[in-house]
């Protein structure tokens, strides 16, 4: 059976699958990233893991994977297939696509983890059937993906969709990116955790605790939560003005609060827009499988493009 290798590389773990032509998952596997051993060990682990998946697929289905798709964090040059930088993995300028293609003897597509997850959400998840969507991941930071007609826009330099670095509070808290007042400094899960820990006096309190306190009617929690919602609404309205998406898909840890987040967020956006159209604002559907599923889509897209190129006169 024709299949591809799909690999999602995270800061602590790797999720992998063998995926069929329709996106169906034929096999799943997980492995630690091994970042404590250094960047060279991480790369070696990725190559070994992919080779094991190739061998498994060849034995089970009678033929090796015809391509592979890999999603990685950090800054990615997708056109060249180079992982330029990832702080949590310690690597710089890793030609991962070529290394994997040489090891596997098959074509490889390399993608940014959030954009790859957004691709999966757009085609297979909450944005299925939507021509234009914006995927926003609210985790330790905030990142996004711009979806247009079934593909995700990387931008001229690979930075498209970085909504977390829209400045929503000029002169506000410094951001590691070098700016002040970036959205992710106020509306990420990490930012809410920090604000709630300070407001509650509990250094171990996090965003999930804050959401529960909001649901129980705690006024301090409500104030912290509303500040985050307001900042997120300001950032999203800027994105709506520029992109005019039909659907906004929100995932990541903060989205697990459900309607505690979505109800006030929809209201806040509705109160801010003027000429813009209110998009559907929905939770992501694929959870932590999105990156892996998206990597599989990258691989099939690569094969489709190769097939079309080969038949073009």
Image: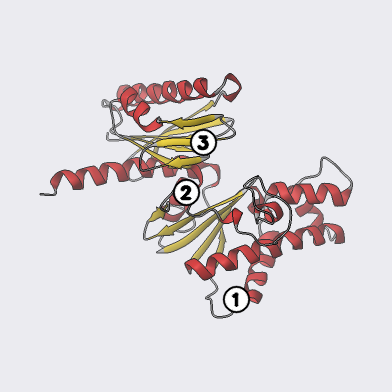
Residue 206 drawn at (x, y percent): 77, 45
> Residue 48, located in which quarter of the rendered image?
top left
Query: How far apart in space, not on screen, are marks 3 and 2 (Cα)?
Result: 16 Å
Residue 79 drawn at (x, y percent): 35, 43
Q: Secondary structure at mark 2?
A: helix
Residue 243 drawn at (x, y percent): 48, 66
Label 3 or label 1, whichever lies nearer to me, is 3
Query: How far apart in space, not on screen, are marks 2 and 1 (Cα)?
Result: 26 Å
> Residue 186, located in which quarter of the rendered image?
bottom right
Residue behind mark 2: 115
Give the mark nearer the N terminus: 3 vs 1: 3
Residue ID at (53%, 76%):
276
Q: Residues within 10 Å of mark 3 (few under 14, many from 20)?
A: some
Residue ID at (50%, 60%):
134
Q: Are marks 3 and 2 in contact (CB under 8 Å)?
A: no
Residue ID at (64%, 59%):
167
Give the mark nearer the N terminus: 3 vs 2: 3
Label 3 or label 2, whichever lies nearer to me, is 3
Q: Residues within 10 Å of mark 1 (few under 14, many from 20)?
A: some
Query: How far apart in space, not on screen, are marks 3 and 1 (Cα)?
Result: 37 Å
Q: Are marks 3 and 1 in contact (CB under 8 Å)?
A: no
Residue ID at (59%, 33%):
88
From the viewer's perspective, is 67 left or right of 44? Answer: left
Choose between 31 and 12: the one closer to the eye: 12
Q: Secondary structure at mark 1?
A: loop
Q: Quadrant of the N terminus?
A: top left
Q: Is residue 233 visible?
A: yes
Q: Secondary structure at mark 3?
A: strand
Residue behind mark 3: 85
Give residue 273's mark.
1
From the viewer's perspective, is 15 left or right of 263? Answer: left
């Amino acid at each position: 059976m024709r299949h591809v290798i799909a690999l999602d590389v995270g800061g602590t773990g790797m999720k992998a699958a063998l995926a069929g032509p329709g996106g169906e998952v034929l096999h799943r596997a997980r492995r630690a990233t091994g970042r404590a051993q250094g960047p060279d060990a991480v790369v070696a682990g990725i190559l070994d893991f992919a080779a094991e998946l190739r061998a498994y697929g060849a034995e089970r289905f009678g033929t090796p994977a015809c391509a592979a798709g890999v999603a990685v964090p950090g800054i990615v040059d997708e056109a060249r297939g180079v992982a330029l930088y990832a702080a949590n993995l310690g690597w710089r300028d890793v030609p991962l696509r070529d290394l994997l293609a040489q090891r596997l003897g098959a074509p490889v597509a390399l993608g940014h983890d959030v954009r790859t997850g957004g691709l999966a959400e757009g085609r297979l998840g909450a944005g299925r059937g939507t021509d234009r969507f914006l995927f926003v991941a609210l985790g330790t930071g905030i990142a996004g993906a711009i979806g247009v007609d079934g593909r995700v826009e990387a931008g001229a330099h690979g930075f498209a969709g970085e909504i977390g670095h829209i400045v929503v509070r000029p002169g506000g808290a410094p951001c590691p990116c070098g700016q002040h007042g970036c959205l992710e400094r106020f509306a990420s899960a990490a930012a809410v955790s920090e604000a709630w820990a300070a407001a509650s006096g509990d250094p171990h309190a996090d965003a999930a605790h804050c959401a529960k306190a909001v649901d129980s009617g705690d006024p301090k929690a409500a104030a912290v939560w509303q500040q985050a919602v307001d900042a997120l609404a300001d950032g999203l309205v800027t994105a709506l003005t520029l992109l005019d998406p039909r659907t906004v898909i929100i995932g990541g840890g903060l989205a697990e609060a459900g309607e505690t987040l979505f109800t006030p967020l929809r209201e806040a956006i509705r109160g801010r827009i003027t000429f813009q159209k209110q998009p559907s604002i929905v939770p992501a559907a694929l959870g932590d499988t999105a990156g892996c599923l998206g990597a599989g889509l990258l691989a099939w897209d690569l094969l489709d493009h190769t097939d079309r190129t080969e038949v073009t006169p």
